[in-house]
Image (tube, rainbow, N blue to C red):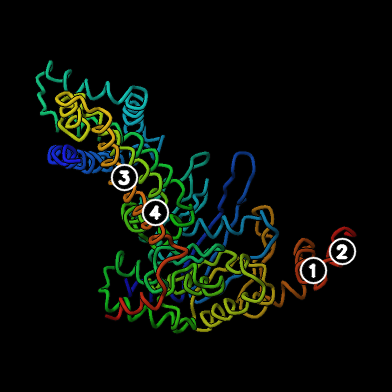
Amino acid sequence: MMAANEQSDTRTPLIVAQNLTKSYGNTPVLHDFSLDVMQGEVVVLIGPSGSGKTTFIRTLNGLETVDAGRIVVNGTVLADNAVAGKKPHKPHHRTLQHVRRDVGMVFQQFNLFPHMSALENVMEAPVRVRKTTREVAEKRALELLDRMGLADRADHRPHELSGGQQQRVAISRALAMDPSAILFDEVTSALDPELVGEVLRAMRELAAEGMTMIVVTHEMQFARQVADRVVMMAGGRLVEEGTPQQIFSSPKDPRTANFVRSIVSPDPVEGLEQAQGS
Amino acid sequence: MSEIISWLPSLLQGLLVTVEITVVAMALGLVLGIVLATMRLEPSNRWLYIPATVYLELIRGTPLILQLFFVYFGLPSVGIHLDPFIAGVVGIGVNYSAYLSEVFRSSIRAVPRGQWEAASSLGMPRALIMWRIVFPQAGRLALPATGNYFIGLFKDSALASTISVTELLFSGQILASQTFQYFKIYGVIALLYLIISYPTSLGLRALEKRIDLTSTRRSELRKVERTA
């Protein structure tokens, strides 16, 4: 296991997604979408809503399936290239569990377990899935909560916590499984504006520690400062990718330019006028 | 007054039987109800869904008293002889399992999808998700309706008198046929039912409050428990 990881560090990407295609009925959500993510890389996906960003990251831990394409996560094949016209085999549930134990996910709506304290939320998977002893799991969970600035909230239930605190518990919960990568699905979109900063700060620290992260977000400031690579999506396709510098300062595709302008614009009315004018 | 006291031993004996029927039939109803609810969770799983649905509609579409007669008077024709108490418990338990299963099914369905997704994204297998994440939340949602059915079952246990179980109502009928004091006897019986059902419903309401996730014990208390 370790040897395989070390091998994959340098050459092969940690996550490989090739030619992913998926549609709901006649509506395509992913269209020949490919993306590789290297170990330690922070990739931020941007694009208008409905562009397939969320669907894409959900395919990486099997919460969504694809109609065609190939997905390999840390050496485990989740989807294989379909024979033309045939859907790839649905991965075996053990394969899914294996990948999910290795790839964490943080959700827009936090999805903490409401009947458990923050500490129990973080301990649950290590104890029940990894069979870590309670003592070890509790110690580690307290460390993680402490790192997220939540040491004094360990015994609070989710409803006793603010949205920002809940989301930081959710990040701790994902970290407790020692994942190779974490998927972030619009994790600040459901937060009150004044709580967004504390969650982004936690994510920035993770990135600095070398965590592999795939982040769907509308926080352009975060993308600019933290991303190694920004990927612009529209209509299920990859429009453009590059460093934050390239994407934000000199986008090649007019759709990227428009999107970035509309989002970054400090004045919503001005943004609206620009959108109508174009 | 003294005659009421003289009736009490046999009425209290009957009340004990009533409580026994209630507890055992409820236990049976809960277990069968959970099994049925699980069978009906995925309509696409036809081998489970269809038999469970047939059972459910059969039970809900026919009177409880008929089901009791069927179990007690009907089954002996196919060689199954049950003692009245057992027949009563089985008949009532099976009947309530149908209603309870619908409560459980809708409660399980009411647990947000995000809970399933969060748990599966941690690599938890399905059975573990059910056991650790879904059931504890569904149980809380199911409690009020389940409590109502529990009290309903307690009162419906009087139907067991029709298959000669000497529970509270039947004990009273025996006394009444000897003394012809219908008013007093049925009045006392009503009080005895109330003495059990009213505190029970108060207790259930307190329990609902206690396990409510939004107004439960304070975190300091949990910390004390954890570190103790």
Q: Residues within 10 Å of mark 2 (few under 14, many from 20)?
A: some
Subunit that carries the residue with mark 4: B
Q: Which of A112/B2 is in front?
A: B2
Subunit bearing disc 2: A
Look at the numbered disc 1 and give the secondary structure of its residue. Answer: helix
Both labels 3 and 2 in a single chain: no
Kindly indicate whether the residue at mark 2 contacts the one at mark 1 (C-beta within 8 angstroms).
yes
Check disc 1 and report the residue beneath it.
A261
Calculate the distance from the C-alpha at mark 1 to the C-alpha at mark 4.
56 Å
Residue that extends furthest to the right in the rendered view of this protein = A277
The residue that disc 3 covers is: B197
Q: Amino acid at mark 4?
A: Arg
Outermost residue, front direction?
B1
Residue B16 visible to an observer of this rendering? yes
Q: Which residue is mark 4?
A: B205
Q: Where is residue A25 drawn, in percent x and y?
A: 60, 39
Q: CA distance from mark 2 to mark 4?
A: 58 Å
Residue at (40%, 44%) from the top-left corner?
B145
Check chain identity for marks 1 and 2: say if they share one.
yes
SS for dot 3: helix
* Left or right side of A214 for A95: left
Q: Nearer the viewer, residue A37 or A45?
A: A45
Placement of the C terminus of chain B among the 4 image quadrants: bottom left
For the residues bearing labels 3 and 4, Cβ distance under 8 angstroms: no
Check disc 1 and give the amino acid type.
Arg
Q: Residues within 10 Å of mark 3 (few under 14, many from 20)?
A: some
Q: Quadrant of residue B82?
A: top left
